[in-house]
Image: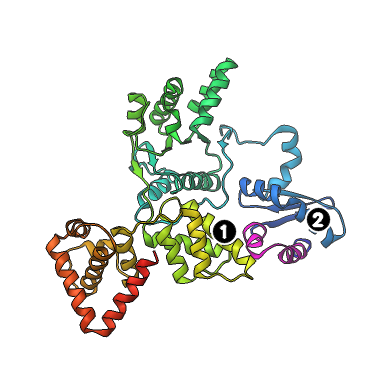
Amino acid sequence: MLWEKTQEILKDTLSGAVYQLWIEPLKCVEVRDDAIYLLSPDRYFSAYVAQKFLSVIEATVKESGSVQRKVILCEDERAHQTLQVTAARGQLRLPNVPENNSCVRSLHPRYTFDEFMVGDSNILAESACRAITTQDDSIGPCLYINSSTGLGKSHLTHAIAHKMIVDSPMTRLHYVTAQQFSSEMVKNIQNRSMDVFKRKYHNQCDILLVEDIHSLAGKKKTQEELNEVLDCLIKSGKRVVLTANQGPRELSGIDEEFRSRMSSGLVTMIKEPDLNTRFRIIGKKAVQHKIELGEDGAGYLAQHIRGDVRQVESAIVAIRAKARLNGGHVDMDLIREVVTSVVGTDKVLTIEMISELIARQFKVSISDMKSKSRKKTLTFPRQVAMYLCRKYTDDSLADIGKAFNRDHSTVMHSIKKVTTMSARDISVGAQVKLLSDKVQSL
């Protein structure tokens, strides 16, 4: 009853999203005279709650029960029974079970597989990361992911760590950046404790996640040491995940043996998300931030913010902040203003931009428009796209045709066809005019 009363007060005190995300998952397992024990999903969830909300929770518990109680977060229903023992002796382990000395960077609570938006641009990388968590050896001993910044490398590596901590808590997982690995190595060399360093990564590691491998360019000693670690782990059947901003072959200042070992498993690239994926990402971010963009607003953002997904969140946060100054109202003028501040104004229309817009308006895919199909549901959108590309870009007929797997004569035919249909059929003319307006607003 104490926790139920506390929850009711917290529900009114905190925002709905914060309550649902950070308070609702907590379960009361025991109430004592001096403490209340709450069960949380994992230790990183506990750490975040302790940092952000513990004082509020303890104050609310006192308000609900009239007695000051300490709030203790635990990740196992039996944890509260062993707290006094573990405080004195450390956590008890079963015989022959290795100590879990995992080293994990601070994990973003929303960087999980469930929160990752899958599309054509990242489906291989996402499925490979899931395979890592299930010990699926089909991808090879080492997974290498490369992409530009803000496309999801860190999200996926955080997701692996979250998944392993929940599903296999005794897995010894080390998650570091390449720079952290290098700094740790240098520190151990200075302290003459390289035996401790080697034991940690060679013998006490089941999964190794290393981000930003490109930062090791020119650092020969660190490359040699990490190469030795990879060799040991791979030969022992352990799992390794590496990320960088380029593929192994494109990295400069990297030892060839190290480059070869990084390429010993699956090498995959995350590309910029397509229009539909960006649209879904924007929709999800808008829900998280409790703002209503509308289909046109979301579509405008999807059209203009094409690369770094972090820019999407930055734009939505800015839209929310500006909307609050306007009484919560979000309109296209506000969205255009924010987009201009995020990506600038020097926007040149491209064949790809127009193709994505037409594909979305006609609810077909880009690949369908590029196919050899002559279905009317595909032929007309394809012809309209070619017509608008010719009208609003400086690309040649040959370039436009190439973009749709056609030749220049087909583009000429499409332009003539759309022009004639627009003149003869009022509804077609109105539709083309509407699409032209949307292209110009990109």
Residue 381: horizontal and vertical position, in percent?
Answer: 25, 71
- The answer to which of marks 2 and 1 sits earlier in the sequence is 2
Q: Quadrant of residue 323?
A: bottom right
Q: Position of residue 85 (x, y in %)?
A: 74, 38
Residue drawn at the location 79% of the way across and 62% of the way down: 2
Q: Which residues are magenta?
A: 5-24
Q: Residues within 10 Å of mark 1 (few under 14, many from 20)?
A: some
| Distance in Å between CA atoms under marks 2 and 1 | 33 Å
- Quarter of the figure that contains the C terminus: bottom left
Locate residue 215: give its quadrant. top left
Asked if residue 248 lies left or right of residue 374, the reply is right
Q: Residue furthest left?
A: 409
> Which residue is under mark 2?
59
| Residue position marked by numbered label 1 in the rendering | 318
Q: In the visual, does 215 lie left or right of 67?
A: left
Most distant residue in the right direction: 66
Q: Is residue 133 left or right of residue 424?
A: right
Q: Quadrant of the N terminus?
A: bottom right
Residue drawn where x is 87% and y is 59% of the image = 66
